[in-house]
Amino acid sequence: MGAQMGDGSQSEPGRTRLQIHADHIEPERAMIPYSLLDLSPVPEGKTTAEALQSTLELAPHAEALGYNRYWLAEHHGMVGIASAATAVLIGQVAAVTKTIRVGAGGIMLPNHAPMVVAEQFGTLAELFPGRIDLGLGRAPGSDRNVMRALRRGMEADRFPEDVVELMGFLGEAQPGHPVRAIPGEGTNVPVWILGSSLYGAQLAAHLGLPYAFASHFAPDALGEALTIYRDRFRPGITDKPHAMMAVNVIAAETDAEAARLFTSVQQAFLNMIHDRRGKLPAPIDDITAVAGPAALAQIGHMLRITATGGPGTVKAQLGALIDEFRPDEVMLAGQIHDLGARKRSFEIAAEAMRALAPEAAA
């Protein structure tokens, strides 16, 4: 992302969290909203149905913890991710919550006709007014075989045009326009641009849209992308830039327990590197037993925007990331095999975010 984390070093194989302490946190920091990204992971030993039920249990928990948004992501053909029908799942999550914003982080627009997306999210907005977000990504979220199954070709990139067309369908009625999205028209569902490169930052700045960077798995361009977005932003749908940074959080009562939980994520990325994707692995005691130094270094690089540890460690690491990149909002992701441990992790993360507020630091 063009910027390194905190100390920029990893002294032990597979160790990805920042090596800092709470006394390095600056005392003055603006309170920022914190949100939650859920892929509805399917753990080893569990079914897709159980993974979906876990999402419906986690969402009200996040709402009670003060999370601002609950976003779900679109992926296809992956046995370890259950959120493929993203709009359907968003509706279910919105139905079991009351106030938290629910949305897509995101819809992979190349897979869909803009009018269909407008109708889906327009329907959600009519059912849950004032609570629906629509994040849009440029990647397909699948391979070529899945794209063919989705009846989408490999035609020229039309992402900017499709974003504008989609916003038009969600906006106010245009006299004389031959096509209208109903539901959709007049709902003005908030649209976000998602990205992991400079492209999305430039587009979001040009259109005056909020921007979310996928730094939880593709961190290399984070710093440069946020700079471009802020420097080039021109008012559009929003009056000023609003940048969200995605951060992995694996928190537990102790650093050692969090490190063990984190091995599920490390194994999942190891499997992805070797093209053997599956369900979310159970944690193990020693990650070096299954991954060598080179693989762990590669995984550590991909996952370096991560806070892992006990409450004090996670607070320090989140504070350091916020101080370095100054996001307007933080999107927390956490792939943990056990639902109870995952809920506790997001509790600790929420406590850390609240503790980082100015009044807590005073």
Image: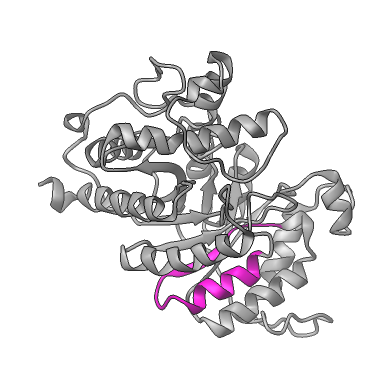
Camera sees residue 276: yes
Tell me how many marks there are.
0
The x and y percentages for residue 24 are 20, 29
Residue at horizontal 80%, vertical 84%?
176
Is residue 87 toward the left or the right of residue 319 in the image?
right
Camera sees residue 233: no
Query: Is-magenta flag for residue 329?
Result: no
Is residue 229 toward the left or the right of residue 85 in the image?
left
Question: Which residue is farthest left?
Answer: 362
Q: Is residue 252 above or below residue 104?
A: above
The x and y percentages for residue 149 are 87, 56
The x and y percentages for residue 49 are 61, 65
Q: Please name whichever residue, 156 or 65, is drawn nearer the observer in this view of the structure.
A: 65
Residue 122 picture quarter: bottom right
Is residue 124 toward the left or the right of residue 4 in the image?
right
Q: In this view, does 296 lie above or below 56?
A: above
Residue 207 picture quarter: bottom right
Residue at horizontal 75%, vertical 47%?
142
Residue at horizontal 76%, vertical 81%?
180
Q: What stretch is highlighted in magenta?
A: 86-108
Q: Please name whichever residue, 293 or 199, is drawn nearer the observer in this view of the structure.
A: 293
Q: Please name whichever residue, 82 or 128, is drawn nearer the observer in this view of the structure.
A: 82
The x and y percentages for residue 291 are 56, 21
Q: Please name whichever residue, 88 or 361, is drawn nearer the observer in this view of the structure.
A: 88
Is residue 147 toward the left or the right of residue 343 in the image?
right
Q: Is residue 129 above or below residue 61?
A: below
